[in-house]
Image (tube, coloured by chain):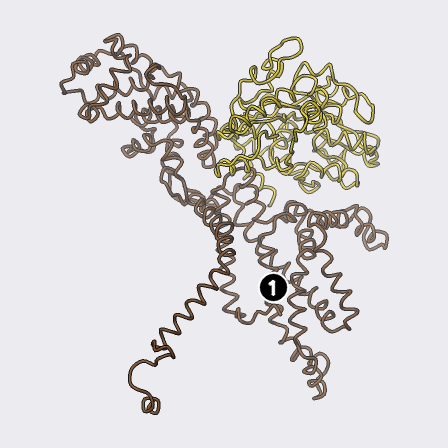
Chain colours: A brown, B yellow
Amino acid sequence: MTDNTADTPAGPVLAADGRPLKASLNRALRAQKIRALLLIAPLLLFILITFILPIADMLFRSVENQIVRETLPRTVAAMEEWENHDEAPGEDVYAGLYIDLFEAAEFRRHTRVGSRLNYEMTGISSLFRQAGRGVGRFDTDIYTDQFTDLDAAWADYATWTGLMGDSAIRAALPETAAAFDTWVRITIEANEDDPAEENIEDFVFFSLYRDLAGSGYSGSNALLSAAADAVGGFDSISIRDQFEDLDEDWLNPELMETIWVYSPSYTPGYFLTAIDMQLSADGITAQPEDRQIYVTLFGRTLFMSLVIMGSCVLLGYPIAFLLANLPMRVSNILMILVLLPFWTSLLVRTSAWKVLLQQQGVINDILVWVGLVADDARLQLINNQTGTIIAMTHILLPFMILPLYSVMQTIPPSYVRAAKSLGATDWTAFWRVYFPQSIPGIGAGCILVFILAIGYYITPELVGGRTGTFISNRIAYHISSSLNWGLAAALGSILLGVVLILYWIYDRIVGIDNVKLG
Amino acid sequence: MNAYSAPYQAMHEGLEVIWDESSAEAVARLRAMNEAGNITWDLVDVVAADAMRLCDEGLAMEIDHDEVLAPAPDGTPASEDFGDLIVSDCFIPQIVYSTTFGYRTDVEAWGGNTPDDICDVFDLENFPGQRSLERRPIGNMEWALMCDGVDQADVYDVLETEEGIARAFAVLDTIADSTVWWTAGADTPQLLADGEVVLGSTYNGRLFSLIEEQDQPVAMMWDAQVFDLDGWIIPEGLPEDRLARVLDFVRFATDTQRLADQARWISYGPGRASSAPLVGQHAELGIDMAPHMPTDPANAQRTFLFNYEWWADYRDDMDARFQAWLSQ
């Protein structure tokens, strides 16, 4: 430092154009970075749009649960006041439910929330489907009749718009105002009609009755005052009884509790289901034993992936060794054989294994013919774990061989020769000199095979039978058959988490720098 | 396809009908299309249970059957011609198929007996050998209970109770170790042809082609066949022009003659009552198709129709139990 300062003037070092060297350098670097970024921008955008965003969206679904709150807002709000959860809630909750279901049915959303809640409690789906038709036939028309008998003006749309245009009246009759708005929305959006030409629905009068009978009316509107005075003498019905008549399950506290437990916008419910737990009235409990499956499946997936990875190492290592050490002519042919499976469809290869491994298949036939196995005790090689392991080892083998081969090619043969010339046996030379140098290839192959194996589902589905299926088969089922995307997302998130943790452990033990693809 | 779109295309020159082969995942794909706001299908082939769910989810269009579909030649409105098969407001029934059993006719261990009762499936003593059943609870649970002395009419009531579920699993337990669980309709025919199983369930049309077209030593056991329906739905939210086009096609392709023609290719019963008398001979084999129909009186002595509503409720719960039971 000292001799530098002796030659140059104090202050920043300048570039040829007189700018400070540091700034000038930075500018050049920045331009380079921007150019590099522009070059990869298409790929980056592509990955972001087609890969990262969908994954993020899917992960979000594992906790998202807005449907209950959005479809049944009044019910959920009224449930805040529900105290004794061992008994069905009171009239207010059912009044909310009535209007919520009416609205949802008009927009055909009631069955959607029904199927959502059916994941948590069997039977809700049809209850909601039924109620969609049922709530329209509730006896709430008695309120309509009584109000219009009292004053025919109540049947007039103009009367209503007049009343509902007054903010003081809206504040005095909150339920009515909300119900009227809902009715207008239904008429315009769901039925595409003109509200002025339609009959006002019963639930609006029902709300009006509840408002007037509940807190009365002390304002100056003559029509409303007259109605408020009259409601005391009105016939009334219990909306709770109406639900009971529809289906007595509506009064089942467990049903209402399920709605309540799953009313928050975000729920841990899917994640709990994914680890064989459940969110119920008593908090978090274990699933009944005859429904526990996911933890077993996660364990099995990990275990079988490890076994597949191990057998790939055992089978792939000698082949890669041969490939790397045989003369070019022979090893090229071997290489083609290794790559050949890539040119065949995965389904064809899996089906070929079926033909080979089944009890009346080629392998059993040969074993019986040789006399190793009796004809009536043919080996069960497929539709179980064995089948999955055999078929998947075969399918994933190239992913082990290729990294091994490329690493082995870089190992100079002179090292082994040197070891031998110093007196090492063949085995010692291999084990102490050659093998350690091939470990980065094993590491790369293992990671590739393991991560591919853990997410596989076509092969286990086809040859897995009872005991050879993976967690990914359940994920696929929930995505495409049961439509429980939340649960599928939770299972997928857990799988992703497990892989990341294993990767971290792997990095700690083997070291990711120690992995080479060539 | 040969029965539906070929004649329609002959009528409308220059029109191309594109069939997408992925409708096995129709429900999931339609939901995804709906969320993305881009419905690429005009008409989707689904089974009745899926049609109900799509209708529930608001993904399929509700239709007025009498307005959209052609009446029978004698003027019977479509809703009466299809009758009970209209299980959902969105569903346009096409065919009746059934899940039934095929067995090999050359099993020596059976001593000349052939299975003719659903309970023979669960009888390893008289009918030893591997079986194949579908890897899902629907159908299997009902059969198991019927063979445990439950009256067919009470099956679903019993299946609602914990005890009933335990009974069904106990029956399935007896054959679990000799059963291959299939997921694709083509599995059982392959397993039967290879002699891998001696008795297996699958769709009756698959067995028809195995027996009649491929001439394998296999025969049908129709007892307690489970009827199911296949048909079409129109996705919700199609633009006017596409909707008009698809409605025109649907009206044509579901008329009495077209549904009867469909049966010339595979042994699935037409959805319309008025099509039944028109069912003729196989297009290539020249054999009479009527006796191969699941709805033929000789075959339909004891039949079972899915309770769609029941399964809509219990499907998730029962599937979880079934899978847990399977992987024990």
Q: Residue B70 at x, y = what percent?
A: 62, 15
Question: Mark 1 highlights which residue?
Answer: A446
Can you say which quadrant of the picture contains the N terminus of chain A? bottom left
Q: Residue B18 at x, y = what percent?
A: 64, 33
Residue A478 drawn above or below residue B237? below
Q: Nearer the viewer, residue A120 or B145?
A: A120
Classify residue A253 as left or right of residue A122.
left
The total of numbered circles placed on residues is 1
The chain under label 1 reads A
Q: What element carries label 1?
A: helix
Quarter holding residue B132: top right
Q: Nearer the viewer, residue B130 or B269?
A: B269
Q: Residue B184 at x, y = what percent?
A: 67, 38
Residue A363 drawn above or below residue A279? below
Q: Residue at x 58, y 41 (%)?
A: B323
Quarter holding residue A258: top left
Amino acid type at circle 1 is Cys
Can you say which quadrant of the picture contains the C terminus of chain A? bottom right
Q: Which residue is drawn at 82% across and 55% down?
A: A372
Q: Nearer the viewer, residue A499 or A160?
A: A160
Q: Residue A352 at x, y = what percent?
A: 75, 49
